[in-house]
Image (cartoon, helix red, strand yellow):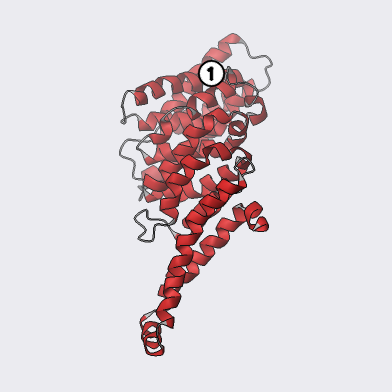
Amino acid sequence: DDVSSASMEFVTIFVNSLKKLDPLPEFHLEQLSGVLSVLLRKLRYSSDFDFQNPLESEEFWLEYRKEILIIFKNISRIAPDLTVSFVQDCMNGLIAGTTNGSQSNWPEIEAVLTMLYELGEVSRVEDACKSTDQGMGKLLSIVLSSNVALHPHPCVQKIYLEIANRYSQFLHKHSHLLPQVLMGFVQAVTNSGSSVKSRACYLFLRVLKSLKPRLGPHAEALMSSLVPVLLDNQQSVSLEHMDRLYLFEATGNILGSDSLSAEQAVVYLHQIVTPILQRMNDVAMEFLTSAEQSVMVANAMTSDDVWQRVGAPLECLGWLSKGCTRLCSNE
């Protein structure tokens, strides 16, 4: 509304004026703490927000939200310790509520996670990697080791996955957090709604590329969940073709990890490739049974059929090979 917009203009001027002060006086830090609380409230989606077809007022609010985040990042630049501590305190309480089975607090969780995501534009991930006992390192450890990824609301799932991708360097350094994060991705690509699934497949590929040297110990758990999806001929797990390609390349990065033995990688590779080649062979056999039947099959099969049964699987195998060049070059 007009009052909020005018207030934000004043807050912007106030925060900018503090950039000249170093160090910040204690009373200004207290003022900024209050501002952060207001910003957090203003960041929250309404519980009935229409994500599919936002109203004009909701689209206006989304633009207003961007302005709030600019102010938040400016505060984090001049008072980084205060900002990280604020987000951490908020996150602790919300995670406790989620653990107790609460699902109605998704706007609060999404808003705090968004703050954490935006901190990635201001804070150095290298500094966060140094320790999980304080500062950004502790905050990331709290979030990434929690069950937030399993929250049922798509907004919370999405921002959690975005955080995992933005801070993948932190995961590389603190690999004990990987099981929870990787299973969060698996959950997203296999069980979530389409609004999450498409983005999850792309981010899963990016995260696995970044963490490729660390994936060997997690291969069994990942492959047991992914292989049925990759071979899902009936497409009970609905995926767009591009998302399926991302998932095949992501799987290739698991198989191509140097921390996974070549022998075990070949076993997993055969689990994927053999059924796909068998299905393609079945298509060929339909043409080779007899000349008369070949004509009938050819007449009955459209170009879309050929693509779905031969072209698409071939392309998927090509994307799989992009991730596991180590195996392809040895075979």
Is residue 68 visible to the viewer in this orientation of the structure?
no
Residue depicted at 57% across the width and 40% down the height? 216
Residue situated in front as seen by the camera: 106 or 310: 310
Is residue 78 visible to the viewer in this orientation of the structure?
yes
- The answer to whether 179 appears left or right of 121 in the picture is left
Question: Label 1 is placed on what type of residue?
Answer: Ser
Q: Residue furthest top?
A: 26
Q: Against 78, is 287 above or below? A: below
Residue depicted at 36% across the width and 38% down the height? 153
Q: Against 154, is 243 above or below? A: below
Q: Position of residue 118 (x, y in %)?
A: 55, 33
Q: From the image, which quarter does the C terminus lie in?
A: bottom right
- The answer to whether 47 appears left or right of 272 in the picture is left
Residue situated in front as seen by the camera: 72 or 89: 89
Secondary structure beneath label 1: helix
Counting other residues with Cα less than 10 Å from the Cα at mark 1, is it few (<14), some (14-19), or many (20 or more)?
some
Q: Which residue is mark 1?
A: 85
Q: From the image, which quarter does the N terminus lie in?
A: top left
Residue situated in front as seen by the camera: 135 or 78: 135
Q: Position of residue 218 (x, y in %)?
A: 52, 38
* The image quarter in which residue 78 lies: top right
Residue depicted at 56% across the width and 42% down the height? 207
Q: Residue furthest bottom?
A: 292
Q: Position of residue 162 (x, y in %)?
A: 51, 39
Q: Against 277, is 60 above or below? A: above
Q: How many marks?
A: 1
